[in-house]
Image (cartoon, grey):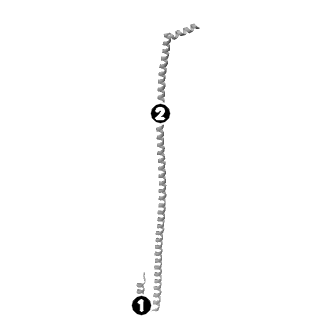
Amino acid sequence: MAGAAGHEGSLLLSAEFWVAVAFFLFLGAAIYWRAHHYIVSALDAHARKVAEELEQARRLKEEAEAALAAARELERKSHEQVDAIVAQAEADAAAMAREAEEALAGLVSRREAAAEVRIAQARDTAIKDLRSAATSTAIRAVEHVLRDELKGEKAQAFTASALDEVTRRLPS
């Protein structure tokens, strides 16, 4: 054992051992630094990608909120327009109903007036025809009585004078 311990002591003192240790330490440090740099670069790239995705998500959220607000405003304006159109249609319908009632009342009034005029004309015509018939009958009766009762020139003169007088006084 003492030989093994002596052999170990000489290994720690040998230059090849220390060169190998230094080489492996250098290799480990190089790998660590290169791996560390790669890991840090990969993490930084991933962090940048996550930050970009978060920024894009934030922009998309803002755009979606703006689009939602615009859609709500459009819906509100549409409801206002619909309400205005309905109110205008109701007002127009009421105005048209009033105009139709007024037109109908005017038509009825004009027809009543025309009927009254026709009735008055018919009454006037009937009265005129009745007077004319009564006058003609009276004239014929008087003429008949006078011819039968009066004779001669005096009767003819009286009859002619009376007929002229009656004809002049009575409307035709």
State the image coordinates of residue 113 (x, y, percent, origin top left). Answer: 46, 71
State the image coordinates of residue 154 (x, y, percent, origin top left). Answer: 41, 92
Residue 153, placed above or below residue 129? below
Residue 41, placed above or below residue 11? below
Which residue type does callout 2 highlight? Answer: Ala
Furthest residue in direction top, as rendered: 3
Of residue 72 and residue 121, the one placed in the foreground of this image is 72
Which residue lies at the image location 47% right of the left edge and 40% below the top edge?
62
Which residue type does callout 1 highlight? Answer: Phe
Can you identify the residue that label 2 sits on?
51
State the image coordinates of residue 120 (x, y, percent, origin top left). Answer: 47, 75
Near mark 2 (Cα within 10 A), the count class, few <14, some 14-19 or many ≥20, is: few
Circle on res. 158: 1
Kindly report the distance in space between the C-alpha atoms of the residues bearing marks 1 and 2.
139 Å
Dot 1 or dot 2: first in sequence order is: 2
Q: Under tag 2, what secondary structure?
A: helix
Of residue 20 and residue 171, the one placed in the foreground of this image is 20
Residue 36, placed above or below residue 160? above
Of residue 64 and residue 6, the one placed in the foreground of this image is 6
Quarter in which the C terminus is drawn: bottom left
Q: Under tag 1, what secondary structure?
A: helix
State the image coordinates of residue 138 (x, y, percent, origin top left). Answer: 47, 85
Near mark 1 (Cα within 10 A), the count class, few <14, some 14-19 or many ≥20, is: few
Q: How many marks?
A: 2
